[in-house]
Image (cartoon, grey):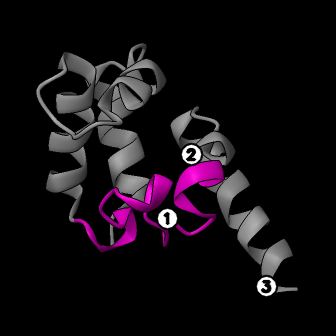
Amino acid sequence: MAEKTAEVVTEAKEAVTGVDLKACAACHGADFEKKAMGVSKIVKDMSKEDIITAIKGYKDGSYGGNMKALMKGQVASFDDAKIEAVAGQIAK
């Protein structure tokens, strides 16, 4: 039941952002509760501003550790409006 609820919430967030958040959930967890690859920050604990900073930094290559190239590819097509929408949907 909880898994189905998380799936419905993820689908609703996708409808708002236009981003396939299931792709994010593969590494970060359905509720963004996991450290991706065991090393990232837990996204659900980040503020909207911190998420925006992280996504923009991944996009321009100025943020992240050893796995930043992976994230750069994931967010390469995001414009500022999409970054804002994604951060707004994920942030606590």
In the picture of the structure, the residue carrying the numbered disc 1 is 32
Residue position for label 3 = 2
- Name the residue: 21% across, 39% down: 64
Decide: marks 2, 3 in contact (CB < 8 A)? no
Query: Which mark sits nearer the N-terminus, 3 or 1?
Result: 3
Q: CA distance from mark 2 to mark 1?
A: 8 Å
Furthest toward the front, the residue is 66
Comes first in the chain, label 2 or label 1? 2
Furthest residue toward bottom = 1
Image location of residue 52, percent across then percent down: 21, 43
Examine the structure image and report whether residue 26 is included in the region drawn in magenta.
Answer: yes
Label 3 element class: helix
Count neighbours of disc 1 (C-alpha within 10 A) and say few if under 14, some if 14 to 19, many if 20 or more: many
Residue 54 placement, left or right of 11: left
* Left or right: 2, with 80 as reference point: right
Q: Residue at x 57, y 34 (%)?
A: 19
Label 2 amino acid?
Cys
Secondary structure under the numbered disc 2 in the rendered image: helix
User: Which tag, 2 or 3, sits closer to the chain's start?
Assistant: 3
State whether residue 65 is above or below residue 44. Answer: above
> What kind of residue is marked 3?
Ala
Magenta range = 25-46
Q: Dot 2 corresponds to which residue?
A: 24
- Depth check: give the residue in front, 82 or 46: 46
Asked if disc 3 and disc 1 are in contact, CB closer than 8 Å, the reply is: no
For the point 68% across and 47% down, the residue is: 22
Q: Pick the quarter of the image with the N terminus.
A: bottom right
Quarter of the image for residue 84 reads top left
Q: Nearer the viewer, residue 41 or 47?
A: 41
Place of residue 38 in the rendered image (x, y in percent of width and height, measured from the top left): 44, 61
